[in-house]
Amino acid sequence: MTGRRRISRAQRMPILAGIVSIVVLITMLQLWLLTATMNAHLGADDGVAAPAAALSLICFALVLGLLRYTYRLER
Amino acid sequence: MTRRDPEEMTIAPDGRPLAEQPKWRRDFPIDVPQDQYVGRREFVKFLALTSFAFAAGQVWILAKSLFGVRPAFPEVEVARLSALPVGGFLQFDYPAPGEPKLLVRLGQDRFVAFDARCTHLSCPVIPQVAQGRFHCPCHQGNFDLATGRPLSGPPRRPLPQVRLEVRDGRVFATGVSERTS
């Protein structure tokens, strides 16, 4: 049985750049979501609060997963 | 002992490979490519913290909408029908003193009332019944007289609307509806 092949730094750099791009996009989506939900909340419209919170938590979980992956890349 | 990584250009003072170095030394590498890698990784970590803050904000809004207490509005007599001609308007404070509202009589049995402060920067709006609008002189904002929705200028949010009841020849204010569209 062969062990897991270690990824070289030259290979890790573009992977990390891709991860950074995805995380930036997810965080911007969360910012937009927060702004829209706050706007609706101030207008006494709380119908979107629950789905927006669920989506934001999913986004956070995705970002955490990607962060964990960046540390795993170095092993 | 761990074998030295061929990509490691820097040799630590104690001669051991990077994997065996304390965390602070691994987080502050000397060679440029590793420093760039660590910098980007730390940026992802910072974004994860930002993402956590946004998610926490969403949960806070959700908790506030579920458990927050909405203000109860009193029923207050605003005007007598005989005192307000069609096309006329009057200002009153509702629900508390210092919260100006505008009541406009659009027709024989048609009344509307809105917050008297512009939703842009809270300047007092002026009813212009002939033009069918509320006008904000500060930044030339205009709102529809019948709906309170923004027509032109910087305001994006409609004027909060006062809920009205007409009975026994009198107009009563019964609540305020905040709106986003």
Image (cartoon, rainbow, N blue to C red):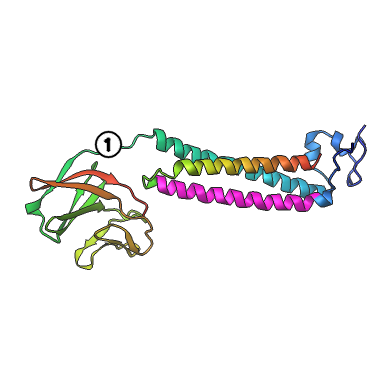
Give x and y (percent) for residue A10. 83, 52
Residue range highlighted in magenta: A12-41
Which residue is pictured at 90% across the width and 42% down the height?
B5
Q: Please tell me in which quadrant of the rendered image residue B21 appears.
A: top right
Which residue is pictured at 41% across the width and 48% down the height?
A40
Which residue is pictured at 74% across the width and 47% down the height?
B39
Above or below A16: residue B88: below
Q: Is residue A18 magenta?
A: yes
Q: Is residue B30 magenta?
A: no
Q: Would residue A71 appear left or right of B49 to someone viewing this image?
A: right
Asked whether residue B32 appears in the rendered view, the answer is: no
Quadrant location of the C terminus of chain A?
top right
Secondary structure character of the magenta stretch overall: helix
Subunit bearing disc 1: B
Q: Which residue is mark 1?
A: B72
> Judging from the image, what secondary structure is the residue with disc 1 in?
loop
